[in-house]
Amino acid sequence: MSVAGLKKQFHKATQKVSEKVGGAEGTKLDDDFKEMERKVDVTSRAVMEIMTKTIEYLQPNPASRAKLSMINTMSKIRGQEKGPGYPQAEALLAEAMLKFGRELGDDCNFGPALGEVGEAMRELSEVKDSLDMEVKQNFIDPLQNLHDKDLREIQHHLKKLEGRRLDFDYKKKRQGKIPDEELRQALEKFDESKEIAESSMFNLLEMDIEQVSQLSALVQAQLEYHKQAVQILQQVTVRLEERIRQASSQPRREYQPKPRMSLEFTTGDSTQPNGGLSHTGTPKPAGRQSSVDGVACVTSIDEAVFHTGNGSRHPTTSGNLRKLLKTGEGQMPRSGLGTSHKRKLQQERGVREEARGTAGRAG
């Protein structure tokens, strides 16, 4: 910076301190200028706030917005194409519905209904993507351009005007100590900057119909989105109502319980699979059947008897029980043996008894 520039900066800083601290009054601007300056300031703040809120309205998830912004930034740095778009909530819901609809299958009512609503949600997400692009192109981008060019240019002119005002006021207070030509040049520069800033603000405020057109584009984009959304939802509603009517007209199926499992107790090592559990459709006996030391016994309310291996029945007296246990007649064949096997065992038992009787007579 040149010496003249350093002097000018010193003059402006001195004048600003005297106004802030010492209460010195500077050159006053007219009321119309101040009103335009106020409106431009409000417009600048409104544009920034509305752009931010519009993005939040279209993309409500802050984490997804931050992730998407980072991906797009990295894509620009690497020279790649634009990354994936914002993950719409409708698309995430559609993905979940379609997934579980396929898992449930078509043999029920809920699965196909999930598929239909999931497809509708997927279409809604596509319409929402179109809304995002439409609003960005016709509303957000024009506002961003207004902020980056026109409003920034006006702020530059106002800042330059303030600097020249301070320089003029500093030299005006020292009139007579500085050359008149220098004071006259300071006044001309101040008036020039004031005129440029005033003209820029006037043009911006006079052409604010452009901002109205941008708002109209925002509303029209939303209207088109909601029209398409209503059409999609009406179609899926009709299909769901038809599905409800069809399901209501069909006879209701009755629950048919399956046969219960029966538990069979066997002596010795069990060779039955599933630990002796089996499904049977036959009704359970009135009494309980069990095996005690090889003797099969059936107990009921009317009578309690022992069934021996040879098919005879004995009352449940203590003497008969001792006799059965002693002679071995109460040994039951293992569960699951066939009739021929039972007959063979009975024949072997008869041979043993006959041999025992012959030995007794010989003695």
Image: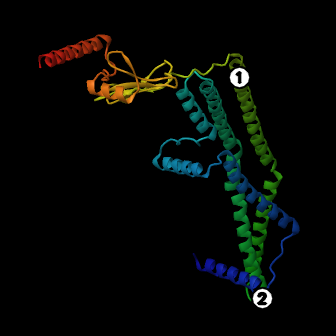
- The image's mark for residue 176 is 2
Residue 279 appears at what percent x and percent y?
Answer: 45, 22
- At horizontal 76% and vertical 71% (from top left) the residue drawn is 190
Element carrying mark 1: helix
Residue 37 appears at what percent x and percent y?
Answer: 80, 64
User: In 3D space, how far apart are the residues under numbered discs 2 and 1 (Cα atoms)?
Assistant: 97 Å
- The image's mark for residue 124 is none
Element carrying mark 2: loop
Tell me which label, 2 or 1, sits earlier in the chain: 2
Q: How is the image coloured?
A: rainbow
Q: Amino acid at mark 2?
A: Gly
Determine the residue located farthest toward the left in the rendered image.
Answer: 362
- At horizontal 66% and vertical 41% (from top left) the residue drawn is 132
Residue 173 appears at what percent x and percent y?
Answer: 78, 85
Q: Nearer the viewer, mark 2 or mark 1?
A: 1
Which residue in the protein does label 1 denote?
244
Q: Amino acid at mark 1?
A: Ile
Q: What is the quadrant of the C terminus in the image?
A: top left
Q: Residues within 10 Å of mark 2 (few under 14, many from 20)?
A: few
Kindly indicate the quadrant of the structure image that contains residue 274: top left
